[in-house]
Amino acid sequence: MVLAGSIARFFTYKKCMDWPVRRMEAMKLTTIGFWGAYPSKNEATSCYLLEEKGKKIVIDCGSGALAKLQNHIELTDLDAVIISHIHPDHIADLYCLEYAMLIQQQLGNRQKPLDVFIYTENVSHLPFSYPDIFQVKQIKEDSQLQIGTLSFSFHNNLHEIPCCAVKITDQAGKSFVYSGDTGYTESFVQFARNVDTLLIECSFFLEQKGLVKGHLSTVEVAEIAERADVKHVILTHFPHYGSIEQLVKEVQALSSKSVDYAKETLSITI
């Protein structure tokens, strides 16, 4: 009986010790859209779904994104949206999402307003119509957000209009950075340093380095990945010519890091 009691206490203790491990829910990142400029047939421009401990957050909401997003979640379950900048390929479907939130509240399927955080100079100039349903808030480089157990910080990018990169960190210290649109800067390298996953725009091939200010080529992506010493690289925001596989090969040839590319089927834990 003493032995049996000791065994029972041991397994009760072990169960308690294991409980926090089983309770920990890793961040899940799902690609919804990945094109730059405009969506290819039946696809979408920049949009990514982040899930953690029941929270559902959309990062960017480009053209075609809303239809694709509904393959993964109900729109009524959204907790927040973060927009890196107001170019149409990153924000176009946000206006449709406002109407979706209005209709779902009218139908009684959602009660709370949706928090929408936008990196721009003046949110009051944006044509939203229902502030009680769609609560649009400006974010700046020094903004700090807490959504559930996730912490968000921001970096001002090199781009033709105000645009930010976003860093998300969970309670376990896991982190990832979404680059938004940006040219190469030393400050971005520091912002992305040591993150577990870097979701980074890759708009140009090796020989096109410097072709357009405010966007990255493969050689610059590789240099950022190496200098920031990130663990995993995911390329996104692709051009509508050439081969995505070639972009990946060029980054892999110049970097020692694990390199993947965003696609509709890509869903990872961080």
Image: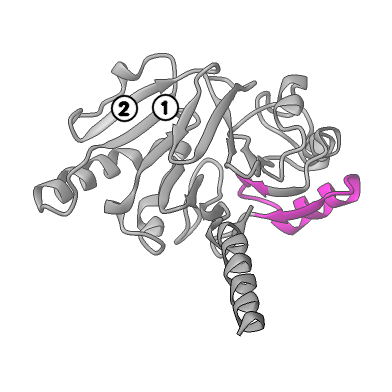
Q: Viewed as shown, does residue 32 lie left or right of 64?
A: right
The magenta segment is 235-261
* Residue at the limit of the structure toward the front, as seen here: 2
In the structure shown, which secondary structural element does the residue marked by tag 1 occupy?
Answer: strand
Q: Is residue 257 above or below residue 125?
A: below
Disc 1 marks a residue whose amino acid type is Ile
Q: Which mark is residue 187?
A: none
Left or right for 106, reference 22: left
Taking 92 as reference, is 49 above or below it?
A: below
Instruction: Point out the tag, 2 or 1, that comes first from the N-terminus.
Output: 1
Q: Nearer the viewer, residue 250 or 260?
A: 260
The residue under label 1 is 118
| Residue 258 on the magenta span | yes
Secondary structure, mark 2, is strand
Residue 243 appears in the rendering:
no
Which amino acid lies under the numbered mark 2 shown in the image of this protein? Val
Label 1 packing within 10 angstroms: few (<14), some (14-19), many (20+)? many
Coordinates of residue 41 in the picture (x, y in percent): 47, 60
Q: Nearer the viewer, residue 124 or 79?
A: 79
Disc 2 + disc 1, Cβ < 8 Å = yes
Q: Residue 130 at what x, y percent from top left?
A: 18, 31
Quadrant position of residue 170:
top right
Give the image location of residue 204, x and y in percent: 72, 40
* Residue at x 25%, y 34% (from the top left corner): 134
- Up/down of 17 relative to 183, above or below: below
C-alpha separation, residue under disc 2 versus residue under disc 1: 7 Å
Q: Which residue is mark 2?
A: 136
Q: How many numbered markers are drawn?
A: 2
Residue 123 located within the stretch drawn in magenta? no
Q: Quadrant of residue 213?
A: top right
